[in-house]
């Protein structure tokens, strides 16, 4: 019973100490909205939602599934180089790759009846996927706040 009371007292002291500390706030800006919210959300949504129907869409349109697989394979191979570019040139390149990925998805939306556009878009989505690297961008830009 005594140890339970002591533990509860320690918890109250810790809570009081945390309440006295100033709360760090991230400054709200357009760059914060773009880098930390919009581009990661778009990148994650593109990588998460489309793949479940990719093969079915190719079959429905009457295209060769092997060509779709080729686009995905080329994108996977190219991702090795994308990761090296990010590592060597800097984390800022993630924004460029995310913009390229969003552009490819927009073109695929506009020209959804063109097989070459859809297959290229699939490759670009994989090659330019920088979802994990966005955590580094957020840390680099807003770790001091």
Image (cartoon, rainbow, N blue to C red):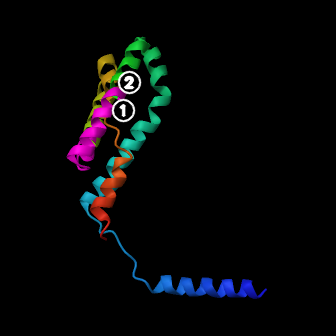
- Identify which residue, 36 or 61, lies in the foreground: 36
User: Where is the C terminus found, in terms of image quarters?
Assistant: bottom left
How many angstroms separate mark 1 from mark 2 (CA)? 7 Å
Label whose residue precedes the other's in the sequence (1 or 2): 2
Which disc is residue 70 wearing? none
Q: Which residue sits at x=38%, y=45%?
A: 131
Q: Residue at x 41, y 43 (%)?
A: 44
| Residue sitting at the far left | 89
Quarter-wise, where is residue 74 in the image? top left
Q: Quadrant of the N terminus?
A: bottom right
Q: Where's residue 81, x and y in %?
A: 28, 33
- Residue 61 found in image quarter: top left
On the image, the x and y values in percent for residue 126 come to 36, 32
Out of 76 and 100, give the one closest to the viewer.
76
The reply to whether the C-beta atoms of the residues labelled 1 and 2 are less than 8 Å apart is yes
The residue at 37%/18% (across/down) is: 70
Tag of residue 126:
1
The relative height of residue 128 versus residue 17 in the rendered view (above or below) is above
């Amino acid at each position: 019973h005594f140890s339970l009371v002591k533990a509860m007292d320690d918890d109250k002291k810790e809570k009081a100490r945390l309440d006295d500390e100033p709360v760090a706030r991230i400054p709200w800006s357009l760059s914060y909205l773009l880098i930390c919210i919009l581009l990661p959300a778009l990148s994650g949504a593109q990588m998460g939602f489309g793949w479940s129907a990719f093969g079915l869409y190719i079959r429905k349109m009457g295209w060769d599934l092997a060509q779709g697989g080729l686009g995905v394979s080329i994108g996977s191979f190219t991702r090795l180089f994308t990761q090296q570019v990010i590592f060597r040139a800097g984390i800022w390149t993630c924004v460029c790759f995310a913009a390229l990925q969003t552009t490819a998805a927009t073109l695929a939306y506009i020209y959804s009846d063109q097989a070459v556009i859809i297959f290229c878009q699939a490759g670009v989505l994989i090659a330019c996927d920088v979802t994990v690297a966005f955590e580094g961008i957020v840390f680099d830009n807003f770790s001091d706040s």
